[in-house]
Every structure is written in structure tokens, then in C-alpha cells.
Image (cartoon, grey):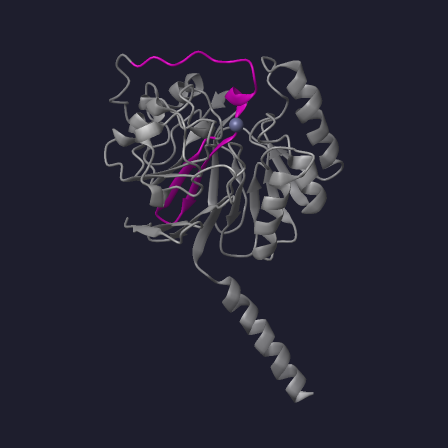
Amino acid sequence: MKKLLITVLTLWLAIPALRAAETLDLYVIDTEGGKAVIVVPPGGETMLIDAGYPTTDDRDTNRIVAAAQALGIKSFDYIVATHYDMDHAGNIPRLDARIPGRIFVDHGAILPTANTRNKAEFYEPYLKAIGDRKRMIVKPGDVIPLKGVQITVVTAGGEVLAKPLPGAGQPNEFAAGAKPEPIDSDDNAGSVGMLFEFGKFRMLDLADLLQMIEFKLMIPNNLVGTVDLFMVSHHGFKVSNSDLLVHSIRPKVAIMNNGQRKGGEPRVLDTLRSSPGFQDLWQLHYSNSGKDKNAPEQFIANLKDPCEAKMIKVSAQLDGTFTVINARNGFSKTYQP
Ligand SMILES: [Zn+2]
């Protein structure tokens, strides 16, 4: 009996020890120019942001499932559908059939400006997949209660924060003369944008948000403040990622979810490099259109198609230190607060 008790106690102690890694870990999965990020804060809960492309061979589903299984994840506490485009919410039903979500987070009804195909092919099947599980429709200012990290919604459904986040709200020095690219006809403008705060570490992920909405978030006052890490919006397309946004939030580091032939546009690469205090860009893929503006090879997870679908991992500490790791070559770099 005593021996059994000791064994049980040892196991019980070992589990928190294993789980008590005091880091926020982000796994940016290669979906060939789609989006899929696994979020693992301390405490045991997990989140998936988008699920890449739906394909008959389940290419992206298999990649996400493999990563989740390696992390011991059997279900996601939260699955965020940032918006109802093919490469974001489009594959959530297929992914959810393999690794189910507990709570689904989205911006509510698809935007009226989105095309009818997205509604029938992605929005409605997403709703059907949720069934009677919990759906959380978020508005700017809402907090998504994933344990171990503070996640504040800054954009959703085309709206932005009504008031600045604590410490932000200064008049924007980059506002003069800035003009946004016009809006397009899909659901990008509705993207759920989130600020992740883990101690002193701050990371902004605006999914595929368009410049028009970036401008509402940054003019006349910067409602977000500055960040350490910026998940480059919209695969590095220039209809997103305005100079105004990027230079205002002053990221040290950016990670871009481009494909070899999708996104990674030269104008965005210029915007990032000319941002005050910017240090490094990491890319999921070499960008054909980026040519000599691509990051140095060691910062790129996949160099050419067909690729090995290598991911980029981020591990952040409470003091604001964070490390980015390229799964292709093991190259890593640590950034100080
Ligand atoms: Zn996209």
C-alpha cells in the first residue's frame, strides 16, 4: 500500500514538473501559404489558430496532427477561426474531425462583402462542424481565457478596439500622409486580430487583416502600443502590413507565413526591414517574388518545393526574452527584452 502511494505521489509530482515549463510556446506550421499556429502556454491548455488548406490528401491536416501528437495534444481547448477564407477556417472541419476543439472562437457572421462561395464552402461547414459545442463570438476588447497567457482581441468583424490598451493610445507619429490600400471582397477585413501578452513578452497576430482596418487601429492614436514579435499579416501581401502599422508597433522580430509562390512581397520585406529597431525576419518559405530581399537562408524554414514542411517554433519567457527556432536546420536565436 505504502509503495503504491509513493508511486502515485511520484507520478503526481512528476506531471506538474513536466508541465511547469514556464514558457509560452508557439508552433508556426507550414501550410504552404495558409495559416496554422499551435499555442502552448504553461498550465496545460492549448489553442489552434486556423488550420491551413482543405485538400483531399489532408496535407495540412496531417501536418497539424503530427505536430499536435508530438506535443501530446489530444484536443484543443480553443480553435480560433480568424476569418472564413479557404486557407484559414476552410480546413477546420477536417482538422477538428481528427483533433477536436472544445471552444470555437470567431468574429461572428461572415462579412456581407465576402463572396458567396466563402459562405457556402467555408463559413457554413465551419458552423456545422461546431455542432452543439461552445462558440465564442468575439469583439475587440474581449479577452480569450486561454490559461497561462493574456489574449486580447484587438480586431474582429472589421471593428477595432474602442479604447487603447493599457500603456498605449499615444498620437501616432507615422499618421501624416499615410494612405491605406483599398479593401477587397473576401472576409480578410473581418480577421480576428489578437495581442498575446506573457509577462513582458508581447506578440501581435492580425491574421489576414487589411490595411483599411490597420489604419483604424493606428490612427489617430496607436491603440496597441509596441510589440516584440509580429506575425506578419496575410502571408506577406502588401494589401496588408502597411508601413503605418508595422513601424508603429516596432517589432524586433517578425515571422511570415508565406508560401514559395504566395505572399512574401518585396514591398512588405522593405517595410519590415525599415521598421525602427527591427532585427530579424523569419520565413516559413523562400519567397520567389521576394528575390534578393528574402531573409538569409538560416532564417527560412523551407527553401524550395517540394518542401519538408518544416515549422518555426517560438519560446517566450515571462521576462520578455524569447527564442525562435528553425526546425529545418536547428538554427535558433534568442532576443533579449
Ligand atoms: Zn490567408
Q: Which residues are magenta?
A: 178-206
Q: Is residue 25 left or right of residue 146?
A: left
Taking the magenta stretch, the answer to whether it contains residue 204 is yes
Q: Position of residue 95 (x, y in %)?
A: 66, 41
Vertical relation: 242 (above or below) 105:
above
Question: Which quadrant holds residue 111?
Answer: top right
Q: Position of residue 201 (x, y in %)?
A: 36, 46
Horizontal side of 92 relative to 229 (left or right) equals right
- Residue 134 image-quadrant placement: top right
Quarter of the image with the N terminus in it: bottom right
Instruction: Specify the quadrant of the image occupied by residue 126.
Output: top right
Q: Nearer the viewer, residue 61 or 210?
A: 61
In the rendered image, the residue lying farthest to the bottom is: 2
Residue plotted at (49% across, 52% down): 41
* Residue 225 x %, y %: 33, 33
Residue 249 horizontal side relative to residue 136, left or right:
left
Q: Is residue 84 magenta?
A: no
Q: Is residue 169 visible?
A: no
- Relative horizontal placement of residue 73, taking residue 288 as reference (left or right): right
Question: Residue 78 versus residue 70: which sits nearer the camera?
Answer: 70
- Residue 151 in percent (x, y) is at 48, 41
Would residue 70 be visible to someone looking at this image?
yes
In the depicted view, which residue is nearer to us: 313 or 177?
Answer: 313
Task: State the count of labels.
Answer: 0
**Who's the residue at 51% across and 45% down the image?**
308
